[in-house]
Image (cartoon, rainbow, N blue to C red):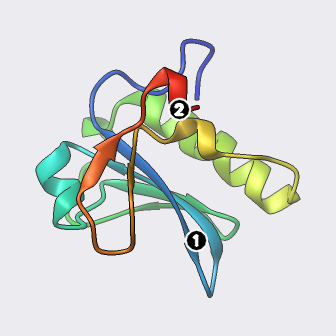
Amino acid sequence: MTAAGPAPSGVVTVTGNARTGTVVRWYRDLLAATHNRPTLSASRDGVMIHGQVYLHTIPAEWITDATLAYEALKAGAGDVSGYATHRRADAVGPLEPITQEAR
């Protein structure tokens, strides 16, 4: 998350994972997020590019944010929930935008 907050385009989710802990995922759009097709993700293990994606097509801000999220998660010293633009009300529910009031 840059000083201005999450990237204006795309969808970002922050979820828990039993194996790797917290994972931040960047999706191109809501459809990709709905079908769980991330472009980029960050966990305490590192930053991963998913699918057949060329690095130069990923917004530089996303790469910077993913690297910062990884560093915070690896150090165990950061709340990365501020990166999220969307969340699910429950495990199988639809993605809902996070409003500034809900942060």
The mark closer to the camera, 1 or 2, is 2
Q: Report the side of 80 relative to 77 (left or right).
A: left
Relative image position of residue 4 (x, y in whole percent): 54, 12
Q: Amino acid at mark 2?
A: Ala
Q: Which mark is residue 59?
A: none
Q: Quadrant of the C terminus?
A: top right
Q: Residue 26: where, in percent of width, then height?
A: 38, 48
Q: Is 96 drawn above or below residue 5 in the view shown?
A: below
Q: In what quadrant of the picture does the N terminus appear?
A: top right
Residue 54 in the image: state x and y as whole percent: 25, 49
Q: Is residue 41 left or right of residue 39?
A: right
> Element type at marker 1?
strand
Please report the residue visible at 59 percent of the width from the left and 21 percent of the height from the top: 2
| Label 1 or label 2, whichever comes before in sequence order | 1
Instruction: In this rendered view, identify the residue nearer to me: 24 or 52.
Output: 24
Q: Which residue is mark 2?
A: 102
Q: Position of residue 56 (x, y in %)?
A: 30, 37
Q: Residue drawn at (64%, 78%), measured in percent from left and top?
A: 20
- Name the residue located 28 percent from the left edge and 36 percent from the top edge: 10
Residue located beneath label 1 in the image = 16
Answer above or below: position of 18 versus 66. below
Work out whether 30 lies above or below 34: above
Q: Residue furthest bottom?
A: 19
Question: What amino acid does circle 1 point to?
Answer: Gly
Label 1 – label 2 distance at C-alpha:
19 Å
Q: Classify mark 2: helix, strand or loop.
A: helix
